[in-house]
Image (tube, coloured by chain):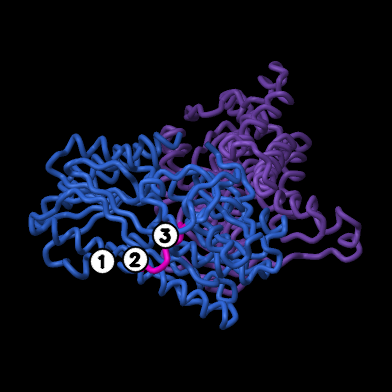
Amino acid sequence: MGIFEAILLTVITAATPLVLAAVGELVTERSGVLNLGVEGMMIMGAACAFIATQVTGSPYVGILAGIASGALFSLLFGFLTLTLVANQVATGLALTILGLGVSGMIGEAYVGQSGIKLPQIVFPVLSDIPFLGPLLFKQDLIFYLSIAVVVGVNWFLFRSRAGLKLRSVGDSHASAHALGINVIRMRYLAVMFGGACAGLAGAQLSLVYTPQWVENMSAGRGWIALALVVFASWRPWRVVAGGYLFGAVSISQLHAQAFGIGIPSQFLSALPYLATIAVLILISHNRRTTLINTPASLGKPFVPDR
Amino acid sequence: MKKILFALATTAAVLGFSASASAQEKAKVCFVYVGSKTDGGWTQAHDIGRLELEKALGDKIETQFLENVPEGPDAERAIERLARSGCGLIFTTSFGFMDATVKIAAKFPDVKFEHATGYKTAPNLATYNSRFYEGRYIQGQIAAKISQKGVAGYIASFPIPEVVMGINSFVTGARTINPDFKIKVVWANTWFDPGKEADAAKALIDQGVDVLTQHTDTTAPMQVAAERGIKAFGQASDMIKAGPQTQLTAIVDTWGAYYIKRTQAFLDGKWETTSSWDGLKDGILTMAPYTNMPDDVKALAEATEAKIRSGELKPFTGPLKKQDGSEWLKAGETADDGTLLGMNFYVEGVDDKLPQ
């Protein structure tokens, strides 16, 4: 295996959780809800996926547990902000704090246990393609799911009727309501989808990236995912580009260091953030299309009048 | 965003404290942790020390701790909360808490503070540290014996003297066995991020190192080493569970005795400002069992450890050159503590440029 291939494999592992969590949050935000609790949902997913895997011995049960815990946890956010109309920013932050705390508590007994790594699924023939084969067809289930989710979300948002409704809810909930769309139900579903994706991203952390459980192991990846959504101006493929670019620069800078090039490591560590922001701003620089893509009702509470 | 989070978290913590403060009259000894108390590394080692302290003096004191406190200005608030909530003696257990501790110590002259691995003291602020570099010297020798390629990977956290000293000691130890031994250094610029530490480990292994050591807090690098089938050293806690076939040894921090000694002095009213810097011989650090290595390497490691304990061997003894080839220590000369605690240069054999 060449060094370039090795780097790309590491990049894929590093970028997958970012892409998953960001695409989930993208759907949530497209429905007009700003959920800052991505980090909390992700860490809950990581904890529950790990615990379920240890208990049942099957990482696939772990994946389900990760998805379910993320979705359930986001339901709490949904109830507070959509039904009780609490402030979304404050509730999202609280969700993150709660998630970090609760996951630490339920996971305490599992710290230090060596986990079970999610096995690779090898596609025969395809995985024999030189270079691309091992990268794309010799991966774990969560990687394939991440691609499927992105393709699915892109199709759903821009090619399906339900996606159009979801976007209309995010752009003007009053108009959507007037048209007879159930705004609150739509937003509940979008919030739960975001939670499920964040939970799956968490499962990737504790089953693939580093198959173990330690408190706080998401280490800020939820926040990076949140930023990706904004800088990608709410477009799924830009989120993918941003996530992989971030991963690529993060990993390359580690290799640059190990190689011994004389650039200060503090600068190299900041580089993924700088490069990702710069590139995403460049590709999203058209103000008009950015405005069109920004959900106009983002973060605004909706109370249907009766 | 993190700041807001932290403000909320500390507020919650304060509410928790005020509720419990009236319930007891025992002296309160408090700890500020940079990571989670179950991180399997640095913070866990401090927490084990805290538990030993409770066990020894539990009838006279009670302990409290704050976990996951970020370094930098945010730490001030956390330390101040503890000082206000009635802690008599506060241990701040990370280098990055230094300036925050100094500031709060000046504000609360009646509270005693102890800062780990720093160098700033005050009438009510002591420092304590451990000569981790003694363990790293032994690791270096083992690495040079084990490595086929003569190159070790080193995952470092931040370019502070403590970490630089460790790198230099490792290389110095290795070069007593193999004078051409080299190390590759990757700075993770974090103490705690399993994913990033794992990425750093993968990068180093992909570039051909066949033995790995770390100065970060989680077991993720050990796990990667195990997966890729190379050997590695644990850090701060015994990490053998993360790599039963992988860990050669680990530097295990054993703070308990120090915490008991200092708390006893505090209770007796005999606490005074000290700058404690103990090593292997004082039991403030120990080496995890030497495993996964041939018997002759194990014997060598044990012999070196015994020599360091007896004081016969000091890791930084000349002749030693700096990275640029200029002379640092003449033959037989040993480095003084001041130089070590302010160490900002590499010795020969480090394949990296020191971030300044």
The amino acid type of the residue labelled 3 equals Phe
Q: Give the distance between the C-alpha atoms of the residues marked 3 and 2, in whole angstroms.
A: 11 Å
Look at mark 3 in the image and give the residue it sits on.
Answer: B132
Give the mark nearest the N terminus, 1 or 3.
3
Instruction: Report which residue position mark 2 lands on.
Output: B254
Check disc 1 and give the amino acid type: Ala
Residue A265 inside the magenta-drawn segment: no
**Looking at the picture, do discs 3 and 2 lie on one chain?**
yes
Q: Which residues are magenta?
A: B311-317
- Identify whether A174 is placed above or below B216: above
Tell me if mark 2 has few (under 14), some (14-19) or many (20+) residues whose alpha carbon lies within 10 angstroms of its own.
many
Which chain, by letter, is purple? A
Number of on-image labels: 3
Residue annotated with mark 1? B257
Which chain is painted in blue?
B
Is residue A140 at least partly visible in the picture? Answer: yes
